[in-house]
Image: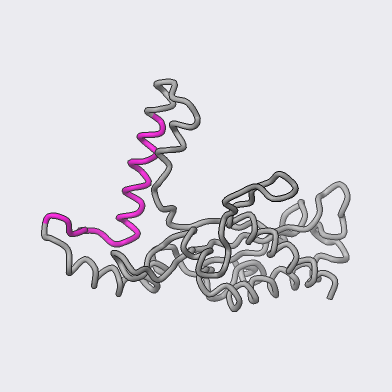
Amino acid sequence: YEKEHNWYSPDNMSLSEAYDLLFSESFNAYNATVRKDRKCNTSYLGKLQTAQQKEQEKIAELRHSGASASEIRRHKKAVKPAYELIIGFGNMRDNPEFCMGGDMQETAKEILQEYISRLKKECPFIYVYNYATHTGENGCIHGHANLIFWAECSRGQKRQASLTKALSAMGYESDKEKGADGKRLNAITKWEMEQREILKKLCAE
């Protein structure tokens, strides 16, 4: 426990604390306007988690009944409350310099922390509520960032958790047609590709 400061960001918070910070005002305002029989008696996070649990139960039921993959995909509509981004350099076999005690371990840690700092500043619709750098393991140094994608919406609750709308607000849209290489990239893939380029530049610096 005395070494926690080496790994965990000092401003970390729980998912429920982050949801209170981001959504409590808009959730309470919206909840006050809906019909009595439609009011949500839990928090916004509780509402999303309940919907996700019901979706998982439905998907398990479909799998058990032998439903096709495409049919199962049609039922994957619940909003995910949060996502985890894992960032690492190299691997144990080829890059011992990034492993515990390696001569590039501290440099890699600095790069990861700088990247997270930039992510917080440059991606306004992504909220990093928890971040840890793993330097005390036998494998290569890597970081775990817990993210909430959110957006301001014109319908329903004013501020909502939404991967698609958050990416759209930052200028990332899924391709409608295949490109010259025969691929059709979705918005999250485009965002991830750009993040890798940012990391490459940080490494070069």
In-front residue for pair 153/19: 153
Residue 86 vs 74, above or below: the answer is below
Colour scheme of the picture? one colour
Q: Which residues are magenta?
A: 37-60
Residue in view at x 57 percent, y 68 percent: 171
Quarter the N terminus occupies: bottom right
Q: Is residue 66 left or right of residue 144?
A: left
Q: Is residue 130 left or right of residue 86?
A: left
Residue 40 within the segment the image draws in magenta:
yes
Residue 130 within the segment the image draws in magenta:
no
Percent x, y for residue 95? 86, 54
In-front residue for pair 159/61: 159
Q: Is residue 144 left or right of residue 169?
A: right
Percent x, y for residue 190? 65, 58
Percent x, y for residue 135? 72, 61
Based on the displayed image, in which of its 4 quarters is residue 187 positioned?
Answer: bottom right
Residue 80 vs 55, above or below: the answer is below
Quarter the C terminus occupies: bottom right
Prevalent SS, magenta region: helix
Residue 165 vs 54, above or below: the answer is below
Residue in view at x 65 percent, y 68 percent: 3
Based on the displayed image, in which of its 4 quarters is residue 121 positioned?
Answer: bottom right
In-front residue for pair 7/64: 64
Residue closest to the far left: 36
Percent x, y for residue 142? 71, 59
Residue closest to the far bottom: 121
Based on the displayed image, in which of its 4 quarters is residue 58 positioned?
Answer: top left
